[in-house]
Amino acid sequence: MSTPYDCGLAAIDAAHALDPNTIPNPNPSETSSSDTPSSETPTIPYELHYAQKCTSYLHKLCPSPSEALRLAIRAQHFRRWEVPRSTYPMTRAGYHAWRTYVKKRQAELVEAICLDSGYAAEIAARVAALIRKEGLREGDEEAQTLEDVACLVFLEDQLDRFERELGDEEKMVGILQKTWEKMSRKGKELALEIEMSERGKRLVKRALEGE
């Protein structure tokens, strides 16, 4: 019999698999954890790839995470492709409004999945709160782990593309400094182990030297 966790994870990944944005599958036949199913397809929906990266970093940061944290990590960008950044004004205020909306939406959708999967309302609400990053400023350890994971996946998987699209090295250095400030000590240690492009390494070096 499937557990609430199994049902919740399957539903989350099924939604990720609907992302129309695909990338070459970096591990077409590899299973890196019990939360990362193998795939033999040459491409993979980006949000499924992102979720698998998040799970991989979660286990590096926290060997025995709670089910609530595992689901929140897996779903922190849940169905985000349906609300692209371009649907809001390309201003700082527009960015913050978009982030606020997608976090709220993601949390509500995943909370409903948790309830449908058989979780008690308390656990479902905890998953939603983590997706919204509630308690982060107050020192919630699980919220900090989620933040670390987001930063680590950004540095490993999104930095080069983001920097090319931004087209402003000084702004990129500032973004990296802010990213570094968000991470815990353990997160920073893992960040320094990431294999980055030469360009990425130089930008990170500049950011850390300017702290």
Image (cartoon, rainbow, N blue to C red):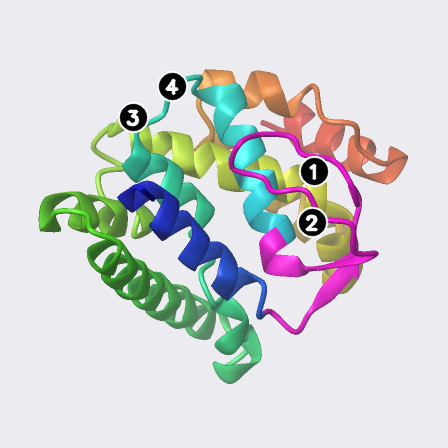
Who's the residue at 44% across and 75% down the image?
Answer: 94
User: Which mark identifies residue 132?
Assistant: none
Say above or below: 197 vs 111.
above
Instruction: Kindly tell me whether residue 180 is visible in this rendering.
Output: no
Residue 134 location, x and y as percent? 23, 45
Mark 4 vs mark 2: which is more N-terminal?
4
Viewer-closest of 143 and 128: 128
Q: Which residue is mark 4?
A: 64
Residue for badge 3:
141
Q: Which image quadrant: the N terminus? A: top left
Q: Residue at x 71, y 32 (%)?
A: 204
Mark 2 to mark 1 CA distance (whole Å):
6 Å
Q: Are marks 2 and 1 in contact (CB under 8 Å)?
A: yes
Q: Amino acid type of disc 4? A: Ser
> Circle 2 sits on which residue?
158
Q: Residue furthest front?
A: 1
